[in-house]
Image (tube, grey):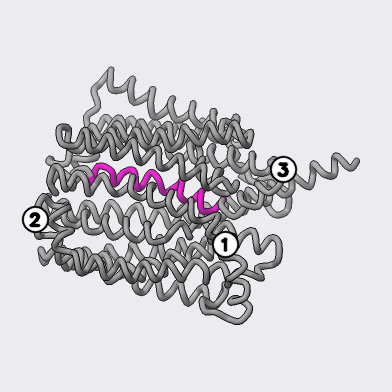
Amino acid sequence: MTGTTGYIEVAGRAEHGMRDVLRGSAINLVGGAVTGLATFVLAFALTRTLSAADVGVFYASTSLFLLVTALGQLGTSTGLVYFIARDDAASGGQRRAAYVLVAARPVLVIALGTSALIAIFAPQLSALLSNGGSGLTLPLRLVSGFVVFAAVLNLCTSASRGLGTMTPTALFDQTIRPVLQIGLVLWAVPTGDIGLVVLGWALPYMPCALASLRWWRRHGAPIRESGSAARASSTVGREFWRFTAPRALAGVAQMAMQRLDILLVGAMAGLAEAAIYTVATRFHVVGQLPGMALSRATQSRLAAALMDPDRTEARRLYQVATCWLVLAVWPFYLTLVLASDHLLRIFGADYVEGAGALVLLSLTMLVATGCGMVDNVLTMGGRTSWNLYNVLVALTVNLGLDLLLIPDLGLMGAAIGWSAAILCANLIPLAQIAFAMRLHPFGAGTLTAMVLALLWFGALPGLVTVSFGLGPWVAIAAWLVAVAGYLASAWPLRSTLHIEIPSRTGRTTS
């Protein structure tokens, strides 16, 4: 009887956890959909109205902004979620303010310093990033003024996720910010002034940061030092940075892998080539959104689940999240593989040059997403040093191949380097998780989702291509049939695919 009761309690906690994950993922997916749409609208507006060189200036300056912003976070986006979630579970959030204070001080100091350095050394950075050109000087100085606001936005939204709510992240960072950016950029583009375009992209960080700060003051804890927070901060500081420091270095390496290749292509092959590479890789920004939504929604729940030596709930979270990830993104990446030329032609004939890079990265992402959120599992399991070593290996591979291949292969060399790095960053931790934690993502749901995606978005379009070729209208027709077949096949298998989530009343809903 005791064993049965224990099983029911574990199952109940798992079901409740999956409801929370699904709810949080849905909120993030809505915000992610807005961000993804904004990404394509922005790319389309820029490529259709500006020269490739000006598009390269825009993406080089904004990439540097995002790179230094991520570096300056020092891993606190993960550390805040980890410690606030665990503290709320253990003590009701008594040290919540102290954790935020410990994280905020160095992040804000670094943001102020970085902003000043970019503004001062903008001419030198422009020459370095654009083969001796000066076109980046003004855009870099304009974006430098908003680094602090980006830091505040990231701090507040990360802390809110530690409370288990995705609303501030989805509202301020994923919805309001990109919508404002699109509006201001579309207003600025007709002027032809690239500095004004870049300013329109950066300006929304200010109101979104202030709004997120106001939310945290009302719903979380004030970001100011009270007496209790001051006493607690000296206690929690060492604990916080012992966990977060490896993650900070890992975050530096991860962002370098995502953004540094754009800067290297611009520096070694020219800004026009960098523009083509950036537009081709924008598809992968969209493809990463479901994974980011699931990752953010599962972080706090996974941190708590991994405290249980049994790890039953952690195993279920990992496998179900991977199943949902494959179900959502494999059709997308398979579509990119088969229709890369047609999709890039939307942005102009010059951008079709990036089709090879798009295909290679799409195939790589099939492998990466099939591994699930491996770095999330390692980090929330307290193994941040392992995650750091993995990311440093991946970054070394990326930089080595980029420096070796970009001079001769241009953007394709960058794609090869990034693909190799992605494989290292996913396959190595996959093996570590299997060995150290006895966890893996390959449940029945994950394997079923893989087969369905390969059948409808791989085999079917491949057969159509062999039979009729893959012109634009044939591709659209094949894709519509694939979507219908995919949904029709998934519905009878909804229990295996974990689409059925127990409701609050205990009934199963679809």
Is 10 on the left or on the right of 158, as rendered? right
Highlighted range, magenta? 278-298
Which amino acid, mark 1?
Arg
Q: Amino acid at mark 3?
A: Pro
Q: Does residue 227 lie above or below 158 as drawn?
A: below
Q: Which mark is residue 282?
A: none
Q: Does residue 277 appear in this view?
A: yes
Q: Nearer the viewer, mark 1 or mark 2?
A: 1
Q: Nearer the viewer, residue 441 or 112?
A: 112
Indicate yes or no whether the magenta region holds residue 289: yes
Above or below: residue 29 compared with residue 72? above
* Amino acid marked by disc 2: Gly
Q: Residue 195 appears in which quarter of the rendering?
A: bottom left
Magenta: predominant secondary structure element?
Answer: helix
Q: Residues within 10 Å of mark 3 (few under 14, many from 20)?
A: few
Q: Earlier in the sequence, mark 3 or mark 2?
A: 2
Q: Residue tagged by mark 2? A: 133
User: Which quarter of the image is occupied by the C terminus?
Assistant: top right
**Residue for point 43% across, 64% down:** 154
- The label on residue 309 is 3
